[in-house]
Amino acid sequence: MRTTLTLEDEVVVGIRSLQKKRPDASFKQIINDVMRKGLLAEGEFRRPPFKVRTIEGVIPKPGLNFDNVWKLLSEVEGPSYK
């Protein structure tokens, strides 16, 4: 989601300080990390539920058991799956 925020001066100073410690992270990444940690501290952060997307018209081969991933990999890819 794209939005506009007005940040107080001390918040910007803190973000810029974090940017110096993490030069590989963008301003956006740092803002998201700090917001996520704040929400987590308040007990309000929840990850969206994991959803499996299927491909329409694709049907798995009969007899494959998806309950045991390691067994499924060995059946589909052979012994070299490791």
Image: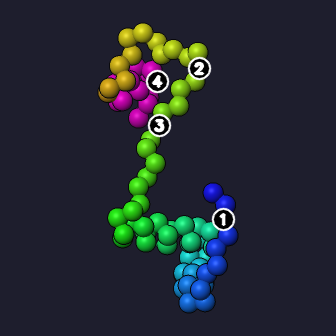
Q: Is residue 47 left or right of residue 22?
A: left
Work out how far the residue at label 1 is from the one at label 2, CA to CA, in angstroms. 34 Å
User: Could you give the CA–CA distance between mark 1 and mark 3, rounded to whole angstroms?
Assistant: 26 Å
Judge whether residue 9 can be spotted in this image. yes
Q: Position of residue 53 (x, y in %)?
A: 53, 31
**Which badge, 2 or 3, is on the more N-terminal residue?**
3
The residue that label 3 is drawn on is 51
The residue at the point 44 percent across, 28 percent down is 80
Residue type (three-letter) at the residue carrying disc 4: Glu
Type of amino acid under label 3: Lys
Q: Is residue 73 within the magenta segment? A: yes
Residue at 43% over, 72% down:
38
User: What secondary structure is the magenta-colored segment mainly?
Assistant: helix
Label 2 secondary element? loop
Q: Which mark is residue 77?
A: 4
Q: Nearer the viewer, residue 69 or 74?
A: 69
Q: Amino acid at mark 1?
A: Thr
Q: Earlier in the sequence, mark 4 or mark 1?
A: 1
Give the mark toward the camera: 1 or 3: 1
- Splitting the image into 4 quarters, where does residue 40 fall? bottom left
